[in-house]
């Protein structure tokens, strides 16, 4: 499976607010971060909770606390499935 994003790419997270389970934290929706690595290929948790297996790359994405919470001078790293991301 080919990875869409590479280390250093700027990405924006989805703003979708689904009615079902999601692993994309609400505080990270619509935010911009930087890919700092990959975390393997795993079934998309949102679909797996519905009985559908669809593996895809998971990325380590670094966000500034300022971007996520409006304050702070540290970074936050999240593991995010490819479906949650788009080009900035």
Image (spheres, rainbow, N blue to C red):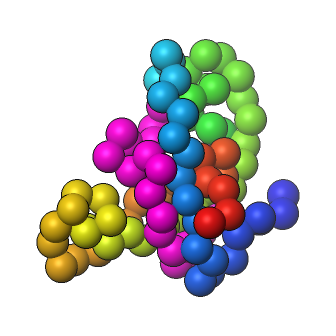
Residue 12, position as x, y percentages in the image = 55, 59
Q: Which residues are magenta?
A: 22-42
Q: Residue at x 25, y 68 (%)?
A: 65
Residue 69: % across, % down: 22, 58
Please name whichever residue, 29 or 21, is drawn nearer the observer in this view of the structure.
29
Where's residue 83, x and y in %? 66, 45
Note whether 49 is above or below 4 in the view shown: above
The residue sitting at the left extreme is 72
Q: Quadrant of the N terminus?
A: bottom right
For the residue pair 68 and 77, the one nearer the viewer reads as 68
In screen coordinates, is 1 left or right of 20? right
Lateral position of residue 53 relative to residue 10, left or right: right
Question: Which quadrant would residue 67 be assigned to in this image?
Answer: bottom left
Which one is nearer the viewer's eye here, 7 or 70?
70
Residue positioned 32% across, 72% down in the render? 64
- Residue at 45 percent of width and 38 percent of height: 23
Indicate whether residue 2 is drawn in magenta.
Answer: no
* 53 relative position to 18: left or right: right
């Amino acid at each position: 499976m080919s990875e869409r994003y590479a280390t250093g790419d700027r990405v924006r997270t989805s703003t979708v607010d689904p009615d079902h389970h999601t692993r994309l934290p609400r505080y990270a929706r619509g935010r911009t971060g930087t890919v700092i690595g990959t975390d393997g290929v795993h079934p998309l948790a949102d679909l797996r909770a519905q009985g559908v297996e669809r593996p895809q790359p998971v990325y380590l994405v670094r966000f500034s606390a300022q971007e996520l919470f409006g304050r702070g001078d540290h970074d936050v790293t999240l593991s995010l499935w490819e479906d949650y991301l788009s080009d900035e």
